[in-house]
Amino acid sequence: MTSHRQIGDWFAHASTGFAVTDVDGNVVDANEALARIVDRTPAEISTANLFELTHPEDRARHRSMLEQLLASQIPAFVIEKRYLRRDGSPVWVRNSVSLINDDQYKSSHLISICEDISQHKRAEQALEKQEQMAAIGRLTSSIIHEINNPLEAVLNLIFLAQRAADLKEAMPYLRDAEEELGRASEITTQGLQFHRQSSYPTPANVIHIVQSVLALFKEKFRTARVGVELETEDAPELLCFAGELRQVFVNLIANAVESMESGGQITIRIRSGTDWQTGDRGVRITIADTGSGLSMETRKHMYDAFYTTKGSGGSGLGLWVTARIVRKHRGHIHVRSRRVAQCGGTAFTLVFPYAGAEGKTAGPHEHAA
């Protein structure tokens, strides 16, 4: 059998990073390309431990996949993760990892082929930021209408209060004005939450996140003649990036409204559930509409960047970003859709494990059925 040293010789001068390690991540052999990627000298990389060079936030996910490999549950795996350079800055890589049994050393070793994808990741992050700003922009009109309504009411109430005969007669108008100002303040607070983003996942209640999104869509629902029903059961908190989950719900709810040109109904259900793919307990959210449904072509490409059915009016990034955020939170998406006149509709079901963005599962897959 070919030894790991012979394999390493083949890749010594390759442009792609390459390493042979033991199952604990200690380097047995590595090429100069890998040393350059992680900003180490060939001597330093030869005595390094690749798990220790891995970004702390990515270690649990990598170890989870490695455990599956060592247990013969998978033949190999590919993972996108970050290594830390000498100065502590991250570099994004795509690692292809497989297991070999080395007869010469009577032990098992890992072969890792490492591709630097930092430039690709920077481009993706720029697109994500672009879509995040576009999502905020799409809400601007609804927020303006939602704030304008109570402000108009306040002006009318103040007018009536000014013409009251005395303070006793004016007080009911002033109390109503105070309530309307409170409503405008709440809408403003909900809108500002889309700009705030923690650097780390924090506990958040999905029911509250969805309610904050619905509050900003009230005027849009009214003008589009769309009814909304929110069904909730006890749903414990997730460790998540709440701002990103808001963006997911904005995308899905906005798409649902746009699919119902003559009005319709959106039903949102939030409850505890089990991810049938992983067995993890978590929160299940279903967003169903009575719209026109999705074609097979759309369902095939809807998670692709720049794919859109809205012509020049769509960026084609909404569902692409949605899928990436769900994947970041170790969640899964399942889609059911019927494209039938008068009785069509689409239902997106999202399942997030309670551990959310700090989970240890290998990652999601999007399914259309």
Image (cartoon, helix red, strand yellow):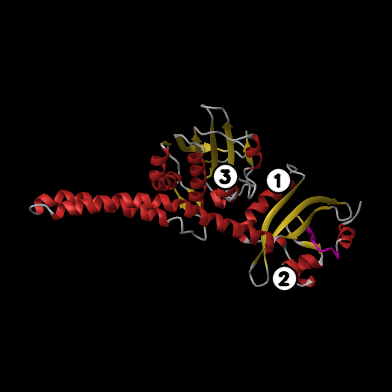
Q: Position of residue 298 (x, y in %)?
A: 63, 39
Question: Looking at the rendered structure, which numbered label has been put on residue 347?
Answer: none
Up/down of 310 relative to 14, above or below: above
Give the residue number, with chain letter if any, for mark 1: 68
Judge whether residue 16 is colored magenta. yes
Q: Position of residue 102 (x, y in %)?
A: 86, 53
Q: Which disc number belongs to residue 310?
A: 3
**Callout 1: 10 Å neighbours few (<14), some, many (20+)?**
some
Q: Is residue 1 left or right of residue 210?
A: right
| Amino acid type at mark 3 | Lys
- From the viewer's perspective, is the residue at label 3 or at label 2 nearer? 3
- Residue occupying image coordinates x 50% and y 39%: 256
In the rendered image, residue 136, in percent from the top left (x then y), is placed at 47, 54
Mark-to-mark CA distance, 2 and 1: 30 Å
Closer-to-camera residue (40/154): 154
CA gap between label 1 and label 3 equals 42 Å
Q: Which residue is mark 2?
A: 39
The residue segment tinted magenta is: 12-21
Q: Are marks 2 and 1 in contact (CB under 8 Å)?
A: no
Q: Residue furthest front?
A: 312
